Amino acid sequence: MKDTLWYSGFDEKQLAEITRRFEKLLGRKIDFEYIEDKNLIGGFTAHIDGIAYDMSFKNRLDTMRMSLGGEKDLQNVENNIQSILSSRVRNMGFGGDVYEYGNIISAGDGVIHVKGLGNVKYGEMLLIAGGAEAVALEISEDSVGAAVLEGEVFVGGQVNRTGRVLDVPVGDGVLGRVLSPTGEPIDGGPVIKFSARRPIENPAPKIFERKAVGRPLQTGILSLDSMTPIGRGQRELIIGDRQTGKTTIVVDTILNQRDQDVVCIYCAIGQKASTVAEVVQTLEENGAMQYTVVVSSPASDLPAMQYIAPYSACAMAEYFMHQGRDVLVIYDDLSKHAVAYRTMSLLLHRPPGREAYPGDVFYLHSRLLERSAQLSDQNGGGSITAIPIVETMAGDISAYIPTNIISITDGQIFLESELFHSGMRPAINVGLSVSRVGRSAQSAAMRKVTGTLRLDLAQYREMSIFLQFGGDVDLSTKQMLENGARKNELLKQPKHRPYSLSEEVCLLLAAENNIFSEIEIDEIGTFSAEMLAELKKLHQDKLQQLDKKRDFDDDLRKDLLVSMKRIAGEYLKRSKKLI
């Protein structure tokens, strides 16, 4: 490739002097092709052996424009163009930008291959002629493979190194905003006022920087908080077929973090734009956007944008974690993330493995989810709780990506299509759902009232399946089925109506003490709402204290049971009168 020098404002004598200085700097003979370019305003840009030396005034002015915020300062720079240019021409120093460049040799489907860029780093940002951006993801001896983030590219276009890896804005300024994976606002709001920028790829906290998970993250969903509790700093997978209520569970969990001092980040990967808009609208209507960030890479985005989305969300979460705050991050969903990565990898000519996924697809998600942790007190005590979502096909949790993520996380919540269509909402399969943190992630109040709930429901659902084939049952089995049916009905919860801790404790306490034993099964939902409303009137101060302390004493237990029995008796009397 012939060495080229673009210039503006120089005569032949000055060009010869520039050439002499380059020969002295590089220690070899240089035969430039001189091209005049008035767009440079002044100065020159030399391309030698894949390295660009940009001493143009256009480059210096662009840099000043980016670094100066006020219009007055910018006007002063433009007024002094001639004096600054004259100084640069006289001194002809090499104090400008020196960067590597290459040229695109192939482009298509959001992936480019670049000749040159011999010193590029993995994950480095690349600038492409015309304003497009890409990230280097495949480095070989003779070329560099990069995924295009945005903009149009063409074969032969120049690609410049930036020397920096991809980063995103972080800070309180991102709260309440809807952002792209690169941190650009896509909600039509003002420019983000951020505290700093943070690389999207960061090492996970070391073992000695962590401590055991022991503080509950209340989801407000009775079946989860009682049987599959989630702790702050835990990674709990939600898995199930499409249209089984996975997104509804995480949205309700975000709604329940109001006044809980938890920052929420919802990362939508490969979702329809209309679906993300509905989630944002729900959060806004319930006042949850003030403590929430939405990072969205819809299905219309290039695969590279979908690939970096969860890492960007995690980087934003890490900022808050290192400030000593608790963060909830939701990745919706990682199965689409894996598909986007597979698409990119095949286009980058990586060898395919099982189901055409590349060999490092496990590392793809492990390095993301391992960044979620409960930090020790010496390291600020902050936490990141991760709830990844994975979509299955026909309930097959033994597929490649689901088994990978199950092995990484600390438990899973399995949503079953059959339960969903039968009217059980949320449609949680008790037998296949587990939290490996267990009761240590529950509050003291919740531990006192969960009792045998999980066992009773598992026995009820198992026996219900068995009795579908017919047969008589004895009295004890009949009672067990009726008790299980009532508890099963109790766990049905309205959409976007998370319970407070005191409400959950009251419902579980009533179930444990057979308060629902004479209530008709189809009336349990109505009676539960009425009972909670009455209890709030009778014991408002004590219930607020329960929410604050997350525990209760025997006196409150007795008072609640007396009130519950009275409320149930009055409800039954009214029901009989209606009949």
Image (cartoon, rainbow, N blue to C red):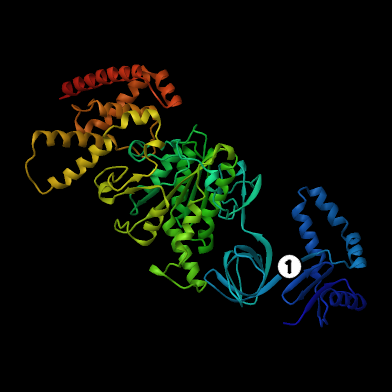
From the image, which quarter does the C terminus lie in?
Answer: top left
Q: Quadrant of residue 11?
A: bottom right
- Left-right relation of 141 to 303: right
Q: Nearer the viewer, residue 320 or 567?
A: 320
Q: Quadrant of the N terminus?
A: bottom right
**Can you give x and y, in whole percent of width and height, for residue 326 in the image?**
52, 39
Q: The residue under label 1 is which amino acid type?
A: Tyr
Q: Is residue 180 visible?
A: yes
Dot 1 falls on a residue whose secondary structure is strand
Q: Residue at x 52, y 72 (%)?
A: 348
Count of marks, rendered view: 1
Q: Residues within 10 Å of mark 1 (few under 14, many from 20)?
A: some
Question: Residue 310: where, in percent of width, then height?
Answer: 51, 54
104 lies above or below 328: below
Per the image, the residue denoted by label 1 is 99
Residue 404: x and y in percent read: 40, 58
**In the image, residue 526 above or below residue 574:** below
Q: Is residue 383 above or below residue 243?
A: above
**Residue appearing at x 29%, y 36% in the figure:** 491
Residue 522, quarter of the rendered image: top left
Q: Residue furthest left?
A: 472
Q: Is residue 172 left or right of residue 222?
A: right
Which of these two is toward me, 537 or 160? 160
Visible residue check, residue 302:
no
Residue 526 quadrant: top left
Q: Position of residue 357 (x, y in %)?
A: 43, 67
Give 298 or 564, whichever is nearer the viewer.
Answer: 564
Of the pair 163 and 411, the residue shown nearer to us: 411
